Image (cartoon, rainbow, N blue to C red):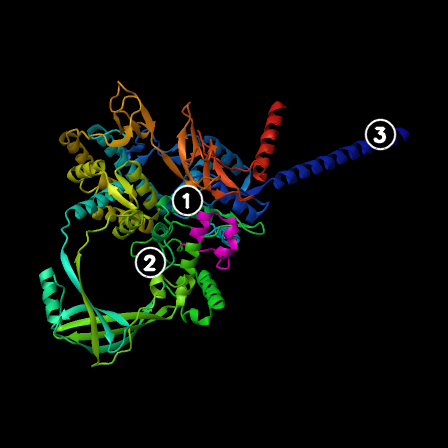
Amino acid sequence: MAATETTEKKTTKKTATKTAAKKTAAKKTTKKTSAKAGKKYNLVIVESPVKAKTIEDFLGSGYKVKACNGHLIDLPKSKLGVDVENNFEPNYIVIRGKSPLLKELKKEAQNAEKVYLATDPDREGEAISWHIAGALGIDEEQPCRIEFNEITRGAVVGALEAPRPIDKNRVNAQQARRVLDRLVGYKLSPLLWRKVRRGLSAGRVQSVAVRMVVDRENAIRSFVPREYWTITALLAQQGSEHTFEAKLVSKNGEKLEPATEAEANAVLEDLKTSDFIVSEVKHSSRVRRPVPPFTTSTLQQDASRKLGFTTKKTMVVAQTLYEGVKLPGGDTAGLITYMRTDSTRISKDAQDAARAYAAETYGEKYTPEKPNVYTSKKNSQDAHEAIRPTDITRTPASVKDSLSPEQYKLYNLIYTRFLSSQMSNATYDVHTCEMNAGAYMFRATITRMTFDGFTAVYGLSDEEAEQKYLPELTKGEKLDTKDIIPKQNFTSPPTRYTEASLVKALEEEGVGRPSTFSPTISTILDRRYVVKEGKSIVPTELGEIVTSMMIDNFSEIVSVSFTREMEDKLDGVESEGKDWRELLSDFYWPFEKELEAAEEKIEPLVIPDRPAGIICEKCGAEMVYKMGRFGEFIACPNYPECKNAKPIKVTIDAPCPKCGGTLVQKKSKKNRTFFGCDNYPDCNFMSWDKPLLEKCPECGAYMLEKQGRGPHKKYCSNENCVTNQKTEKTTRKKAKEGDA
């Protein structure tokens, strides 16, 4: 019995031990599972690090936001990358230097509960998301894509609540454009190298842009000025010394514009014996309506005219305003909506906010009864809104201290344009008087503002502030003639394009889309098909020769109408799901035949080198511009006897952080690129990495972009900035782990 009890006790003890062990194991498993679950997060992938930082601040600890730095996957640079025989299949590869970043994103995606692809809300952004989805094994038909038109907390959170599948039509439209441009560029450019000069390129949009500049120059050259005369009468009421001007309009009811001095003198002779009698007095009103908020094109035009910005600079600065800046109080937010758009549409919430702000700031009468609505152009893509401030209460003055001078100027331009677009019309009183002098009729008109309306945002222009004099006249009143002034004039030729007017012309002709205007102009300038003389864009001899060759052999490629039709077809792929490969096929096979014919037809051309206006210090010859593998440079014409060569000065958009002067790209003695101030030796600023326009979101110092191979990483110039401290801590941690 005792033995039995002992055995039972041992069994009970053993069972209890096993049970306790199981409970402990269960606790450990639960703890382990819980810990594993605690590591889970939602991953959001955007394009830029600045945008990533801004959005991460919005979302908090349950999210990780990573930047892909633009395209990770694209066509190869070294070859065509399109299998034309296999239905134009693109051969995509991971871009050189981007493999580590893609590997990092894959790792983050594996540990994430959900992955959201939040690249830019346009075709390029959609294609980037599609490529990432494929690389990360994400089902593109599942709701993985989010998009927002502005980088604000509300917009980002709202987008996360409404994810969607990847828009394959939009992707296919981007693929069609990318492949189409690749086929044109990679087939035409080598032909230009062989027949004209190394380093040249051709493109579907850029070649049309060059032709437009060349055509304008030819129109200027062929213009024959026409002489015409204006005759102005200086009149006054009888007994008054206050004079006013009246212009000759007609004779015997028919419009009259003397074409020669003899004709003008005949009029003057007739007027010697004619009294000026008031024949008509009219009072009318005129309304001036506000203009729509900015599209990409109109922003580039206005920034060029009013701020002197290049199209490239405008887009660079606008990007920083869109991605987010650190504001007073520590908040980070995007100040403007997405800056690549050709729509004038705005959301009802933004419209209501602007109307309320205008009424509160300027008065109820400054807000129209019904909201102002603007119609976008026929061929515009209405995917997202016009460019506007994300918060109308965030005035330019309130954020000025957080912005660079360039950012402030552009934000002020965007802000005032948007606010004014939702305000009342300006009204004017128009006072018109007509005077007969025998058979001749003269007219005097003045316009006076009666209500400033939307112009209150801008203030009075010089013309509006200047009050011209016109007395209150009565019909039948006789006037004193103080003087009759004839003036010879000549009609003017068409004006040369500026960056602003070329963008406007490209848009009006339907050549390209908002995202292409700036890079197109940069490309034709870089290739020296055109040059800038002041603000004017002028074709070079090279540009004219290449354009002439293109017209003779590839008339459709440089045809405005053909390019416009192609843009419409690309739009059809996105909006209607049309077959993008069929579009390519319809274009390519006739184009290939033109290439074969041109190869045989075109004789090699010899273009004389352009003088550089610099004397070679080694042999005394005038140096010339040459084209090499890496672009244009200055060299001695006596090569190889004299091998003297110099780089061409390349400026960057950011100002010198030290003196505000122009920054230029330079080469060291060891051929290493660096950036220095053009005011050297008065200013000795120098940096191995490229200074940027944007400010650090943490401390406000200027940002730098790391140069060299691989992705160009941005970092703060302030060594003591918390962002750099974080980087240093991470580096030390990794080094320590490596030692271990």
Tell me if mark 3 has few (under 14), some (14-19) or many (20+) residues whose alpha carbon lies within 10 angstroms of its own: few
Above or below 171: residue 464: below
Label pair 2/1, CB-CB below 8 angstroms? no
- Picture quadrant where residue 9 is located: top right
Q: Is residue 661 left or right of residue 606?
A: right
Callout 1 secondary element? helix
Residue behind mark 1: 316
Q: Is residue 357 magenta?
A: no
Residue that label 3 marks: 7
Q: CA distance from mark 2 to mark 3?
A: 92 Å
Q: Is residue 265 above or below residue 545?
A: below
Type of amino acid under label 3: Thr
Marks 2 and 1, how far apart at CA: 25 Å
Q: Given the image, on which type of amino acid does mark 1 rest?
A: Val
- Where residue 685 appears, x then y in whole percent? 47, 34
* Any part of residue 115 in sight: no
- Lower position in the chain sequence, tag 1 or tag 3: 3
Magenta span covers which residues? 387-411
Mark 2 or 1 closer to N-term?
A: 1
Q: Kindly identify the residue that appears in the image at 29 percent across and 25 percent down.
A: 616
Residue at label 2?
A: 376
